[in-house]
Image: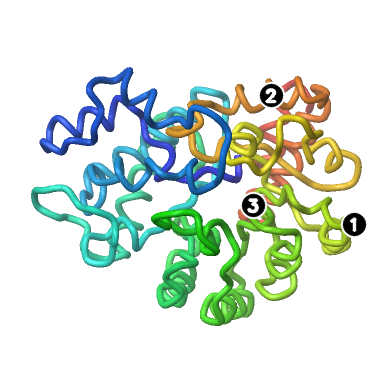
Amino acid sequence: MLHTHLDGHIRHTTLMEYSKKKKIDLGYANLQDCLKKTRPSKPSTLQNYLKEMPNYLRVIVGDRDALTRIAYEAAVDQANCGVIYSEMRLFAQMMSSSMSSLPKGSGPMTLNTTREVVDATLAGFAKAEQECGIKARLVLACFRDKPEWADEVVTLCQEYKGKGVVGMDVCGVFAPKQTAKEGEEILHPQVIQAFKKAATLGVHRTAHAGEAGPPSNIARAITELGAERIGHGYAAMREGGEAFKLAISKKIHFEVCPNSSYLTGAVKPTEEHPMMAYKHNASFSMSTDDPTITHTDIDDEYWLALRQGLSPQDIIKTNHDAIDNCFLPPEEKKALRKWFDELNGLA
């Protein structure tokens, strides 16, 4: 699975536990209320989809043990659904008490630097791998609204290459209201420069594009950022499909998240899902995006895809595409493909 946000992959029971332990009122009367308020009641916008995240992250920001725990639990939960390899992305600076603009809870802050955030996350992944066998790897995300952080992201990707960090991403913002900043419209020169630097260093690159924004954002992600994969990319077929043709010509992989694509309003209930077009020409895979918000696991994503018209054989192909386009070294990809095929009787 290639597209999950760790800050959107926190068990609701864990949120409630930390809320009580730290005496931080998240506005959830009980677990059922937490479940109700973390999931959008109906499809709307990306901004509305993300609105609860800054609230519940207050119990995690700056807390080493909490971050290690949610990383561990996210990997374990995926393993329990049969996932054998996962790339989870994170705004590492956003979890640091010294850099985060998110509201912080009370108590001692034990994550003061971005490196400490990365170390805490990888510790959780390592524990899950030891217990469950799942390979969980970290993709460090640039924050479009904080372009000054981008260079550090590249530095950390290079520093932790081969140690659990496999690539970088660029994602949207937490805006107070729906504005031009919503989604992936901003592409700051510092972010562009960081991606170009990453390419020269051999750091793998993916980018959120064409989710809340137009197809031109997909084209820019490919041509200006040198993205190897596109997160979401549902707008690719619009406006004549030129962005889709470009992606095909460059062998770009699409990271599709079926349930969130509807909740964010990126795909309308009345239109055919773009993955139905992708299956004929494009490389794509399916992921859960933000289970804390979507309340789904990978099986739910597969079931939705099947209802949309994909076949079981298509689902297998998406997994092969995911393996072929993951950010592991070639030999590890080969071993992962062999492992997947053996587990599914395809060897």
**Residue at mark 3 to residue at mark 2: CA–CA distance:** 18 Å
Which disc number belongs to residue 270? none
Q: Position of residue 20 (x, y in %)?
A: 14, 30
Quadrant housing residue 341: top right
Which structural element holds mark 3?
strand
- Residue type at mark 1 is Gly
In this rendering, position of residue 326 left or right of residue 275:
left
Say whether disc 2 or disc 1 marks the residue closer to the N-terminus: 1
Q: Position of residue 167 (x, y in %)?
A: 55, 61
Q: Dot 3: within a 10 Å radius of its alpha carbon, few (fewer than 14), some, or many (20 or more) residues?
A: many
Q: Position of residue 149 (x, y in %)?
A: 41, 73
Q: Residue at x 69, y 71 (%)?
A: 226
Quadrant housing residue 33: top left
Which residue is the site of mark 2?
304
Which structural element holds mark 2?
helix
Is 213 drawn above or below residue 22 in the view shown?
Answer: below
